[in-house]
Image (spheres, rainbow, N blue to C red):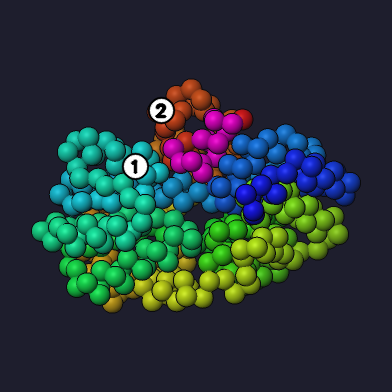
Amino acid sequence: MKFLTEYRNPELVKFYLNEIEKIVTKPWNIMEICGGQTHSLVKNGLLELLPDKVRMIHGPGCPVCVTPISLIDKAVALMEKGAVLCSFGDMVRVPGSKKSLLQAKADGGDLRILYSPLEAVQIAEKNPEKEVVFFAVGFETTAPSNALSVVHAQKLGLKNFSLLVSHVLVPPAMEAILDDEFCNIDAFLGAGHVCTIMGTSEYFPLAEKYKIPIVISGFEPADLLLAIYHAVLQLEKGEYKVENCYERLVKDEGNIPAQKVVNEIFEIGTQEWRGIGEIPNSGLVMKEKYKDFDASKKFDIENLEKKEENLCIAGEILKGIKKPVECPHFGKLCNPGNPLGAPMVSSEGACAAYYHYS
């Protein structure tokens, strides 16, 4: 299949591995931001094939994993109030402080698993007597479709549709990681899908401020190894640039129409990250003029007490301080059948990737 098979070519993979081996002279820590990249690195055995001097550190780029417990609890509370809660499937088993969305459904709540927020708009249109809430989580990648759902609901004059928003932004998370006293990151692999929406411009100030290479990468084995090669090459030369190694999809300017619809509905605000805490200006919140579509303001759920898990070390996993196998509960008390935290639930979670493929 074009744009897929050639990036899984074993000979090309072997070529890039040899090229990395030729140029690396020092130990380097490279963080891949996106959970999809983590999944591919582990699934395809690339972590074992890379030279010992190149250490990959897994970042916080799994949207399900960084959605805070307080938001899960709010979603459960909405179901208990009788709302129809709509969500992508990967959110339903993430533990809240008391129960997951799936457990709330088992207790009688109305949970609908959808593939698009526009389906939730259709449900609201067909059921005017019910409040329909879409659980809008994710990075910049999913923000346009969620924003578009509000545009459509407004055009239809719907009063029973709203979003429970937990949108987070990649660059502020990278900055928070770099400011951490335990940070040992030498370079980043930028999240390719995020950059298809937002472009590359937001990375230049980070590269300059922290003197750190940022290489935009795709998700196939050859994509990742090409990006790692360029990151190592910059590090060995003492350079710190933003490079785009995913040019078949990422343009410098990003997706302008998608950015316009996001900027119409959302504005930048403080967001809580699961296991990390609040990061200023790290998320998208709904603008005041769209408050009627903001479930947190529409319903009396704004001040639910925040409770974090005691056993899960998601924060340390998401900041790259520890690997999943360093958790004492990994594969024992915590497994996909009994997840203690979100990184074991999501298909993009580092713990789930290690459990299934490592």
Instruction: Report how far apart the C-alphas of labels 2 and 1 lie in the structure.
Output: 13 Å
**What span is colored magenta in the figure?**
345-357
Q: Nearer the viewer, residue 129 or 126?
A: 126
Q: Secondary structure at mark 2?
A: loop
* Residue 200 screen position, x and y as percent: 62, 69
**Which residue is drawn at the image coordinates 54% and 30% (left, top)?**
355
**Is residue 19 toward the left or the right of residue 95 in the image?**
right
Instruction: Determine the main secondary structure of the stretch shown in magenta.
Output: helix
Q: Nearer the viewer, residue 61 or 73?
A: 61
**Numbered circle sitting on residue 92:** 1
**Is residue 128 toward the left or the right of residue 178 in the image?**
left
At label 1, the amino acid type is Val
Can residue 8 be seen by looking at this rendering?
yes
Q: Tell me: residue 95, above or below residue 299.
A: above
At label 2, the amino acid type is Gly
Q: Nearer the viewer, residue 311 or 188?
A: 188
Where does label 2 land, which residue?
A: 337
**Which residue is drawn at the image coordinates 20% and 60% (left, top)?**
124
355 drawn magenta: yes
**Which residue is drawn at the image coordinates 60% and 58% (left, top)?**
192
* Precedes in sequence: disc 2 or disc 1: 1
